[in-house]
Image (cartoon, grey):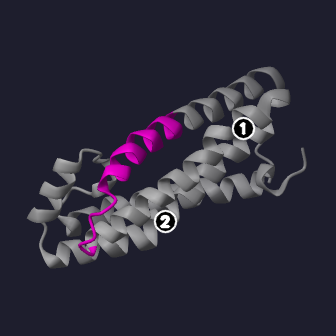
Amino acid sequence: MNMLITRNSVLYLLFFFTVVLMAGFVLWTPSVGGVGLDGISSVAEIESLLAGMSESEKDSHFWMTLLLDMLFPLAYGGLFAGICLKHAGRYARYLVLPALVVIPVDMLENIIQLLALKDNVSFLELKALLTPTKFFLFYVAAAIASASLLISIVTKGFSIKP
């Protein structure tokens, strides 16, 4: 398996970007009022949060979603997919599916959030489905990547060569 995404240097870069983006969320979240839309799936809770946000909080959330959260699924999804493809053996092409599917699911959810932050709440029912789906796929992909990496380390040893 000599795909670009399975190279150690690419995996390290994806890990780095995942961590940097996570730190960005931690630093940026206070300016959106302390709670982001990303973890909320209930339409009523989303509408309540939006109603309680100031225009500057909505604007800050919009930019956080656009600049950080649109890149985040590419970073963590790519990382999980690369680890899986590199270490999951002959079943990798099936086990990688949650990591590949979570990327567009998360990005579509982000687009709906961007619309909602600009007062277009037409798609909140779809977000109510996408958010739990995103979290499910994220955790499954993370578990598969972690398990495949751990099994590979136990059976083959660990190499940190770029």
Q: Position of residue 50 (x, y in %)?
A: 17, 63
Span shown in magenta: 118-139
Foreground: disc 2 or disc 1 = 2
* SS assignment at label 2: loop
Local crowd size for mark 2, using a 10 Å CA cut-off: few (<14), some (14–19), many (≥20): some
What residue would you read off at disc 1? 84
Looking at the rendered structure, the kind of residue marked 2 is: Met
Q: Is residue 83 above or below residue 56?
A: above
Q: Position of residue 80 (x, y in %)?
A: 64, 44
Circle nearer the N terminus (2, 1): 2
Per the picture, the main secondary structure of the magenta-coloured stretch is helix
Identified at 12% across, 73% down, the residue is: 54
Tell me if label 2 and label 1 are in contact, CB under 8 Å. no
Asked if the stretch drawn in magenta spans residue 127, the answer is: yes
Horizontal relation, residue 147 to residue 114: left or right? right
Asked if the stretch drawn in magenta spans residue 84, the answer is: no
Q: Position of residue 22 (x, y in %)?
A: 43, 56
Q: Residue furthest left?
A: 52
Can see residue 157?
A: no
What residue would you read off at disc 2? 70
Horizontal relation, residue 119 to residue 139: left or right? left
Q: Quadrant of residue 69?
A: bottom left
Horizontal relation, residue 161 to residue 33: left or right? right
Looking at the rendered structure, the kind of residue marked 1 is: Cys
